[in-house]
Image (tube, helix red, strand yellow):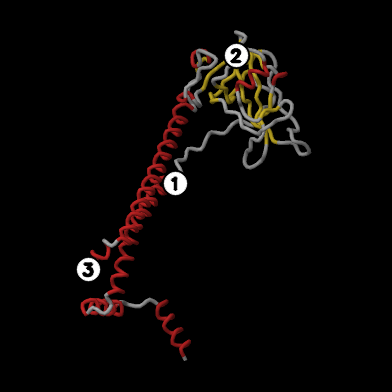
Amino acid sequence: MKILRLALTRRWLGYLAVAIVFAIVCVGLSKWQIDRTNEARTANQLVQRNFDSTPTPLAEELPTRTSFAASQEWKQVSLRGTYLMKDQLLVRNRPLDGNPGFEVLTPLKLDDGSVFVVDRGYVPTGNDQDAPDSVPAPASGEVSVVVRLQKGEPTLDGRSAGTGQIATIHLPTVAALVKLPTYTGAYGLMVSESPAAATRPIAEAAPTLDEGLHISYAIQWVLFGIMAFLGLAYAIRQEYRIRNADDPEEREKAEARERRRQAKPRSDAEIEDELLERADSR
């Protein structure tokens, strides 16, 4: 039986179909990893472009209270107003370096009467209660603040929070609590304020610019797809050799392979295995 005739039997054609489907899935997963690389690269470029940008007035960057575009994330804006301490909120479940804590949201009432939400930073969970031991107070009176723009967060089903706390930075929820016209398109991570408070919560660190290992994973998926066909070819060849073991031509090829194998220099491990086999046979 010729090897091609064996490969074209129904059983092996079925295995070939499985290998093709597996290879298609591998290619799809490889493309997905490449897409993730491109997403990470785009996010990194956005940070590099906006993180240290020159602050622009809030009204120029966000002409309406619902304005915000993805390209504005991390962009620095300047604003002036008075903190509404009575409406300050703590955002739960915000880890820093593996430690649980909160982010401090303090609404800032602007000169036109609207409110912009400022995230002043992180405070750790208290030693004896599910709340901070203390929260640094902001400066009183009118202040000038520079923030980096961030998109608001969605709500999370099943997540609750105690009095003065919220589960996520869901800006419409904050607006409902403040009961004043509030920016709901974006909030700001505080960079600086003048006059500055005596102390402030821990500032948000710069994001890590890392594309990850997605390209390596993409290459691995392609190799897996290729290996499926190589494995299939090897299995067909082995079955062909077993079925035709009595064929003179195949016997001659098998002997030639054995001679080549024996002619190859043996490794120390192979020699040790042979000695152990001889000892066991005694």
Does the CB distance between marks 2 and 1 fall below 8 Å?
no
Dividing the picture into quadrants, the one containing residue 248 is: bottom left
| Residue, disc 3 | 2
- Tell me what residue is drawn at x 32 percent, y 70 percent: 239
CA separation in Å, label 3 and label 1: 45 Å
| Of the two numbered discs 2 and 1 in the rendering, the one whose residue sits closer to the viewer | 1
Q: Nearer the viewer, residue 31 or 91?
A: 31
Left or right? Give the position of 108 relative to 206.
Answer: right
Q: Position of residue 274 (x, y in %)?
A: 41, 83
The answer to which image quadrant residue 174 occupies is top right
The image's mark for residue 136 is none
- Given the image, on which type of amino acid does mark 3 rest? Lys
Q: Residues within 10 Å of mark 3 (few under 14, many from 20)?
A: few
Q: Is residue 200 left or right of residue 220?
A: right
Three-letter amino acid code at disc 1? Leu
Q: Does any portion of residue 18 appear in the rendered image?
A: yes
Circle 2 is placed at which residue position? 80
Residue at mark 1: 213
Check disc 2 and report its element: helix, strand or loop. Answer: strand
Q: Given this view, does label 3 or label 1 mark the residue nearer the observer?
A: 3
Q: Residue at x 61, y 27 (%)?
A: 169
